[in-house]
Amino acid sequence: MQSSMRAVLSFLDAPQLNAPEAYVKFNPAVFADDGTVTDKGTADFLRHYMEEYGAFVERVLAANAPGHIGDPKPDAEKLSR
């Protein structure tokens, strides 16, 4: 399913987070009862993954900001914000 979705997103020229890539299997031994991650390696990996995801979202939002190259007619008021 994931590779099919990537093909569709590529065809649509949609932004994708291609790396880092993760296939996460739930392991109850890694999580405490309150949901915190108890395994340091897993916690480090998840932290890094979310940092990369946050940076990806910032890049996508910046690319879609008013006045970017894809705007048919940049609005001067939007650009001054």
Image: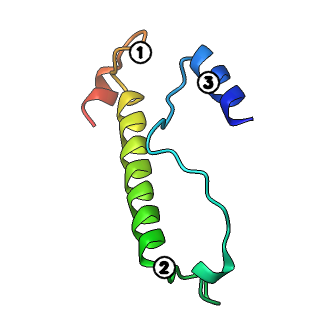
The outermost residue toward the left is 80
Q: Residue at x 66, y 62 (%)?
A: 25
- Residue underneath mark 1: 71
Q: Earlier in the sequence, mark 1 or mark 3?
A: 3
CA–CA distance between discs 1 and 2?
Answer: 46 Å
Q: Is 59 left, or right, of 30 in this rendering? A: left
Q: Residue at x 51, y 44 (%)?
A: 21
Q: Amino acid at mark 2?
A: Asp
Q: Residue at x 66, y 30 (%)?
A: 3
Image spot of residue 14 (x, y percent): 54, 24
Q: Amino acid at mark 1?
A: Asp
Image spot of residue 9 (x, y percent): 61, 24
Q: Amino acid at mark 3?
A: Leu
* Secondary structure beneath label 1: loop
Q: Earlier in the sequence, mark 2 or mark 3?
A: 3
Q: Residue 54 bears which disc, if any?
A: none
The outermost residue toward the top is 72
The answer to whether 56 is drawn above or below residue 43 in the figure is above
Report the quarter where the N terminus lies: top right
Q: Is 63 left, or right, of 18 in this rendering? A: left
The answer to whether 29 is drawn above or below residue 17 in the figure is below
- Residue underneath mark 3: 9
Image spot of residue 43 (x, y percent): 45, 72
The answer to whether 33 is drawn above or below residue 6 in the figure is below
In which image quadrant can residue 63 be found?
top left
Report the quarter where the C terminus lies: top left
- Residue underneath mark 2: 39
* Secondary structure beneath label 3: helix
